[in-house]
Amino acid sequence: GTVILGGGSGFIGTALGNLLRRHGYNIITVSRMPGPNRMSWIELMKNGIPDSCKAVINLAGQNILDPKQRWTPGFKQNVYSSRINTTQWLAEAIDKASAKPEVFITVSGVGYYKPSETEVYNEHSPGGDFDYLSKLCTDWEAAAKLGHSADVRQVTIRSGVVLGRQGGMIQNLYWPFYFGVGGPIGCGKQFLPWIHVHDIARQFLFALQNNKVNGVLNGVAPQICTNGEFSKAFGQAMWRPWFLPMPEFVINFVFGGERGMIMTKGQNVVPKRVLEYGFEYIYPDIKSATENLAKMIVVE
Ligand code: NDP
């Protein structure tokens, strides 16, 4: 079957596209850039989704942690609209389609839950209403709600920090660690709700293929770690020191406090529902994940 993949050109989207192709799916990426097997967002709005489409997935979104971008109102607007609008456009295309896909899967973030060193969050925990990022998650999840497609199954994966060599946090940290100046951020005691990129891609496939799966799934590994524990595991896997802390004020200076929080604060999130459904992780613990991430050559 055909899968429509918004943001299929990105870090997670590339890993997911490759996984889906290996499982025999045909991928059409929705992108701002034209290319083979792609459609633009304008084409999507004009022509809708093809009849034979099995699933619609959205992974589009302006990179929040781009250090070249200042945290200005204009950039925040891009961060917001690149997620909410693309999700809404796909939802509208599904609502309008005469032949519906089986499932609509979208992504959101664990920023939905309030950072804390004591609370433990599952999918039923409250959140989504206390700061910019949590409200972004609420609006993002709301944008995915289908109006009149009752037969289309819906899944939202609230993703933790995705660890992979081709993007996200590891792309920013690999060379500092390589040169021996890696280390925890701030005190290192904040939780780091993480997941390996192969496992998050597999969660999307799992959600696509299992027709019992619906609603919100926390996209995190079953073994939570702190930022300090992550630094130690990554440093050891790279055979490098891991103890040079990155002061919190440097992060706040580069990223701005509101988004620096993604790194300086954290939340203890458990993937309760996906475990109940029987999903199995390839990288359940930070040691196995960082050993894989430290390899010089990686295949996404
Ligand atoms: P990427 O930064 O790799 O970007 C994904 C894609 O979004 C890009 O390839 C691009 O596609 C599209 N995009 C970028 N900017 C815009 C824009 N202004 N308007 C429309 N489309 C845009 O993201 P990831 O793969 O890392 O993440 C995918 C999604 O998952 C994001 O929404 C992200 O917030 C979410 N997520 C990611 C986490 C992580 O750790 N990586 C953690 C939690 C959530 P193109 O250029 O083809 O248009």
Image (cartoon, rainbow, N blue to C red):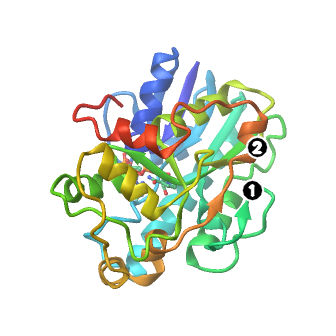
Question: Mark 1 or mark 2, which is nearer the start of the sequence?
Answer: 1
* Residue linked to disc 1: 122
Q: State the residue at coordinates (23%, 52%).
A: 240
| Residue 51 drawn at (x, y percent) | 63, 24
Q: Hey, what amino acid is under mark 1?
A: Asn
Q: Is residue 287 visible?
A: yes
Instruction: Please identify the quadrant where the N terminus is shown.
Output: top right
Q: Nearer the viewer, residue 228 or 282?
A: 228
Q: Secondary structure at mark 2?
A: helix
Q: Quadrant of residue 136?
A: bottom right
Q: Nearer the viewer, residue 3 or 199?
A: 199
Would you say the residues marked 2 and 1 are in contact, meaning their CB atoms lie under 8 Å apart? yes
Task: Residue at the far left: name it.
Answer: 179
How many discs mark residues in the rendered view?
2
Label 2 beta carbon less than 8 Å to ligand 1: no
Q: Nearer the viewer, residue 19 or 92?
A: 19
Question: Where 158 sits versus 149, above or below?
Answer: below
Q: State the residue at coordinates (40%, 34%).
A: 38
Task: Residue at the far top: name it.
Answer: 24
Q: Nearer the viewer, residue 298 or 25?
A: 298
Q: State the residue at coordinates (71%, 69%).
A: 119
* Residue linked to disc 2: 273
Q: Hey, what amino acid is under mark 2?
A: Arg
Describe residue 209's horizontal placement relative to residue 286 as left or right.
right
Q: Secondary structure at mark 1?
A: loop
